[in-house]
Image (cartoon, rainbow, N blue to C red):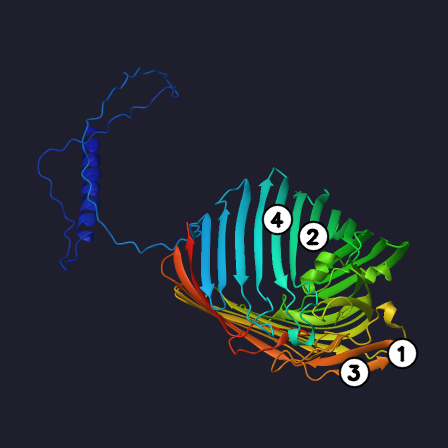
Amino acid sequence: MNRKLKYSRILVVLNLSLILGFGAFGQEETEEEIDLNVVIQGTAELFLNDANKVSKLPEIIESSVELAPMTYSLIPRKPTQKIDLKPVPAAKVTIDKPRPKLFRGYAKGAVGTKFTGLGEIRFMDGYNRNGTFDSHLKYFTSDGFVSAADSIADSFSDLSIGVSGKRFLKKHSVGIAVDYDREKIHYYGFDPDVFPSNYEIDDKRIYRTFSTGVNLRSYERDTTKMNYKGTFDFKQFSDNVKSSENNFIIGAKLNKFVGSENYALGVDIDYNQFKHEVFRSGVELKHNNMVFTLNPTITTHRNGLMVKVGVKLTANATNGTKLRAYPDVEARYSLFDGIFIPYAGLGGELHKNRYRTIVGENPFVQNFLVDDLINPDVIRNTNEKINIYGGVRGNISSNMSFNTKISRASFDDFIYYANDSLVTPGNRFRTEYGALKRTTITGELTYNAGDKVKFFGRGDFYIYDDREVEQGFNDRVAEEVWNQPNNKIAISASYNIEQKLIAEIEISALGKRRAKSLVEILDMSEEGATTGELITNGDNTYYAYTLDPYIDVTLKSEYRYTKRLSVFAQINNMIAGKYQRFNAYPVQRLNIMGGATYSF
């Protein structure tokens, strides 16, 4: 039995050896044959060990291991850094330009031919978010040298003093202004050879204006709330022959948005009192005039379209109350983002004439010393019954804009002027009133290339309807459209070279006009009035003249030596035209003036 077991063990070992041997030889690439014969010498004992089996199922033995706390510390060590510099391109940052230095004071002085002098000083506030302040004093004088004889005074002067200010509150602003003006002129428009030496001639007039105004305005950003503006203005106008005029104006305007519509209401109360003495009598006369105006409007904006619809209601309390209503309608439409804007409108207005406004238009007017005895309404308001207009405005480029317009207007009691002869040698003008129907064609062109180049041109061309007048002399009705030009042109241009040298030119032209005189006016200029035509219409006899058109050119230049100091020169009436602005009143010919300005 033992022997058999030994042989069995030997066989097992041999088999294992053979298997291992074949595996080893299989890993090698050889062409030799494998010899499987094994020779064992000696006694071999073969035995088989018993298997050691686990008698129990495995069990999980839980055990906890307590770990000691770990502590550590960092060893301070300065890191070694290598800095590699690389160029970075400059960044383009858009910021607001710093505000230029604002000088608070300004002075200007000049002298010129014909004993011309100019002085001006202005003082204003600097940058102040709480409000603004401005004050000025200006004086201009000249000896004229335009009268028909050296014995006739023709000097003139103008003095202006003013102070104004505005205070900004949280949602409101309050403004106030006080001004005083004094203008002196002479009635030089006559020939002394026509009148005897003992003829009493009132040749000088001094006009004085004192005005003050206060306004309050709200600035509500919330469009659902109402904004308003209230104004009060007082003007006193007087002359050196005991004429005086007091004018009070109280106004208010309210506006509020409701959706896309803006509702507005304007209210205006204008009271005027004119007082003067009757010629050589010591009797004082008064002319009172009150006008109440109510102007409600509704304005809407829809996709480039603007439409305003409203009405002007006026009550004129002069020699009885007269009620009038005028349309206030306008529409415009924006095409191509405002490049072209066609517009049209329909309106009218009661123009309030005052002694002050009449003098501002014609300073050689008389002060109504005689005519009010037979014409108590010597100062009438002009009734613009209707004004219909339409046109196109827009932008040709970012620097150029234009405006074209045609309008048709009809007036009652339009003011005209005629040389009077009742108490003067024809050198003062009386006012006459009459109807006027006029078609106006207007064109404008503006070019603005910053401060370097600027240009503005405007032309107005008038077409008047013919009319016939049947009233007599005492009705003060104009027979023609006296002193109304058939065209008016204004052109101005400036060129700035590096903010150092500035050149400007101004050109104004006025077309021919018809003038009326109750006395024969001799030719006061080489190019002025033509020979007068004597016209007799019943009891009304007068002379009619044609005033030739004229062109006036003014050239200005300025050299800015520093930001504070500059010098300038100015040539007025450069082409030396001896034209007449009013009948028998030629203007100064060539006049040269130079001076300097200084800011502080």
Secondary structure state at the residue bearing disc 1: loop
Label 4 and label 3: CA atoms lie apart by 45 Å
Q: Distance of mark 2 from mark 4, alpha carbons?
A: 14 Å
Q: How packed is label 4: few (under 14 Cα within 10 Å), some, or many (20 or more)?
A: some
Q: CA distance from mark 2 to mark 1?
A: 37 Å
- Picture quadrant of residue 299: bottom right
Q: Which residue is mark 4?
A: 179
Q: Is residue 331 above or below residue 37?
A: below
Mark 4: secondary structure: strand
Callout 4 touching callout 3 (CB < 8 Å): no
Up/down of 26 relative to 495, above or below: above
Q: At which x and y percent is residue 92?
A: 38, 55
Mark 2, secondary structure of its residue = strand
Residue 349: quarter of image: bottom right
- Going from N to C along the chain, the mark reached first, 2 or 1, is 2
Q: Could you tell which of marks 2 and 4 lies nearer the N-terminus?
A: 4
Judged left or right of residue 253, residue 21 is left
Residue type pointed to by label 4? Asp
Considering depth in this image, is 200 or 337 the residue closer to the camera?
Answer: 200
Closer to the observer: label 3 or label 2?
3
Label placed on residue 538? 1
Q: Quadrant of residue 11?
A: top left
**Mark 2 — residue?**
238
* Residue 373 x/y as whole percent: 85, 59
Find out whether the residues at labels 2 and 1 contact each other: C-beta distance under 8 Å: no
The residue at which mark 3 appears reads as: 534
Residue 311 in sight here: yes
Residue positioned 76% across, 84% down in the render: 533
